[in-house]
Image (cartoon, rainbow, N blue to C red):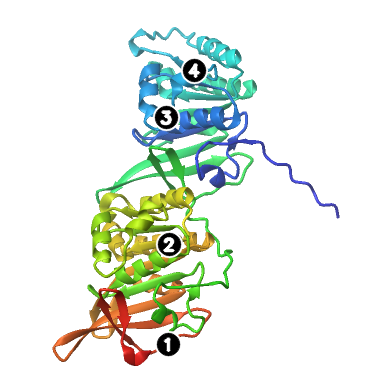
Amino acid sequence: MKTQNRQIFPKTSSGITGLDEITNGGYPEGRPVLICGSAGCGKTMFGVQFLVKGIMDHDEPGVLMSFEESRSDLAKNVLSLGFDLEQLVQENKLRIDHVKIERSEIEETGEYDLDGLFIRLNHAIDSIGAKRVVLDTIESLFGGVENLGLLRSEIRRLFSWLKEKGVTTIITGERGGKTLTRQGLEEYVSDCVILLDFRVIDQIATRRLRIVKYRGSTHGTNEYPFLIDENGISVIPITSLKLDYRSSTDIVSTGIADLDNLFSKKGIYKGSSVLISGTAGTSKTILASCFAIASCKRKEKVLFFSFEESVNQLIRNMATIGMDMEPYLDDGSLTIHASRPSLQGLEMHLLVLHKLLKDIKPNTVVIDPISSLISVGNSSEVRSMLVRLIDVLKMNEINAILTSLTSEAGNNLKDDTIEVVSSLADTWIDVKNTPHEGRRKRSLNIIKSRGMGHYNDPMEFEIKDQGIVFDQQYK
C-alpha cells in the first residue's frame, strides 16, 4: 500500500505573534481573508500589521485601501506602535488609497458596480508589485445600496477578482445583528474568517479572537485572547499546551543553605515549580526573594511579578534583612514587574508574561502572590489560568516560584488557588505562624517534593538582619 504524500497548503505569515501557530502557518496565500467584529476590537490594526510585517520581514509590498480613515489619520494612529506608514510609502513599498464614498451621492440606477474600484486597486497593486492587500471596511462600499441582489453579486465579484489577482487580501467588516457581517454574505465567500470580540466582564476588558472557518486547512478552534500594546498585536494560543516538556536532573539552590539540606538532593530540580503557601506575615515573599537572588548569583535572569508591593517597597523591605536587590536590577539580571491584578484580565496577565518571557528570557520567574488573581476572576477562571501558567513555565524549563496567601480554619487551608496549584507544583512549602507562650513562632514544612526525599517535620525559623535563620536544634 503506497503512502499518499500530503501537499502543504500555501500560506502567508500574518505578522502577528501566535496567530501563525493557531492557523498552522498563517493566512491562505493568494486568497481573501475576512476579519470581522464590533467597533474597537482591532480589525484595522490586524490589517495594518499584516502589511507592515509583510514589508519588513518578508519584503512583500502591500496596498491599503481605506474607505473610512484618511491616509494621515491612519499613519498617526499606528505611529505609536512603531509602524511608520509614511516612510514605507516613500520607499515605494506601500500604497495607501483613501476612497471616500458618500451615501447621499449614490443613486441606484440598476448599473451600480465596482469597476472603478477594480481599476484603482489594480493600478495600486501593479505599480509596486503588491503581494498583500487590505480593504478597510467593506460596509462603506455598499452603504447606500438597497438592492440586495445587486449588492450580493458585486460582493461575489470583488472576492473572485481578488482571488484571480493572486494577492493575499484582508477584508475587514462590521459585525451584523444575527450574522458575522452586515450583509451576511462575506463570511460564505471568504476562504478564511476570523471573528474578533471586545468584551467587558466585571469591569475587566478582554479582546478575543476565534477562527470561524479556514478552507483547506486545520486550525485552532478555541477562543484566544489577544493584546494590543506598543509592539502591536500578540496572540498566545494558551489552550493548546500539551504535556510534552522535558524534565531536568540538574539541582539548583533555594538560596538558603539550611533549606537546601532539607531535600535529599541538596536543592530542587532545575525548571521545577515551587509553591510557597501560608497566612499573612509568614515570610512567603522573603522566601521567594531568596530564590530570586540565588538565581541572580548564578548569573541567571529573573523575572519577578509583584502584585502587592511596588518595586521600591520590595527593594526596601528586603534590604532590611540583608537582601540587596539593587545591584541585580542595575546589571539587568533582575526585572521586577509590579502591577495590581485588577489592571487587566487574567488572560491578559498571561499574555504579558508570555511577552516578557520572550523579551527577557528569564531562568526564574517569581509570582507573588498568585492568590491576588482571584480578585479579577472566579474560581474556575483562576484555576484554568494557573494551569496554563505553570505549563508555560515548565515548557520553557523555567524555575517557577509561586506564593499564595491562605486563610486557616482548624487544620484546613482555604484558598481557591491552593487546590489546583498544589497538585501541579513539584515542590510545596507551607509556612505558618504558631502562637507559643505568648509569642509567635514561624515554622516551615515541606509538604511534597517530586522526585526526591525531604525532611517531613516542621522547621522553626526566624527573620533576622541576615535573613532567614533556622533554629539551631534542627541543624
Residue hosting label 1: 455
Residue at image position (39%, 8%) is 107
Q: How far apart are marks 3 and 4 (CA)?
A: 18 Å
Image location of residue 76, percent across then percent down: 36, 23
Say what secondary structure mark 4 lies in. Answer: helix
Q: Name the residue under label 4.
A: 89
Up/down of 457 relative to 118, above or below: below
The residue positioned 37% from the left and 78% from the top of the image is 429
Residue identified by numbered label 2: 296
The mark lying in front, picked from 1 and 3, is 1
Mark 3 vs mark 4: in front: 4
Residue 464: x, y in percent?
A: 25, 76
- Callout 3–callout 2 Cβ contact below 8 Å: no
Q: How far apart are marks 1 and 3 (CA)?
A: 58 Å
Distance between the Cα atoms at labels 4 and 1?
67 Å
User: Is there a contact, CB below 8 Å, between mark 4 and mark 1?
Assistant: no
Q: For residue 122, say whether it is visible.
A: yes
Looking at the image, which residue is at 45% across and 43% down? 234
* Label 3 element class: helix
357 relative to 319, above or below: above
Q: Which amino acid does label 3 sit on?
A: Thr
Residue to which mark 3 is pinned: 44
Badge 3 crowding class, 10 Å Cα cut-off, few under 14, some 14 to 19, many 20 or more, is many
Mark 1: secondary structure: loop
Q: Going from the N terminus, do you reach mark 4 or mark 1 first?
A: 4
Q: What residue type is labelled 4?
A: Val
Q: Is the residue 99 above or below the residue 449 in the image?
A: above
| Residue type, numbered disc 2 | Cys
Q: Residue furthest right?
A: 1
Q: Which of marks 1 and 3 is nearer the N terminus?
A: 3
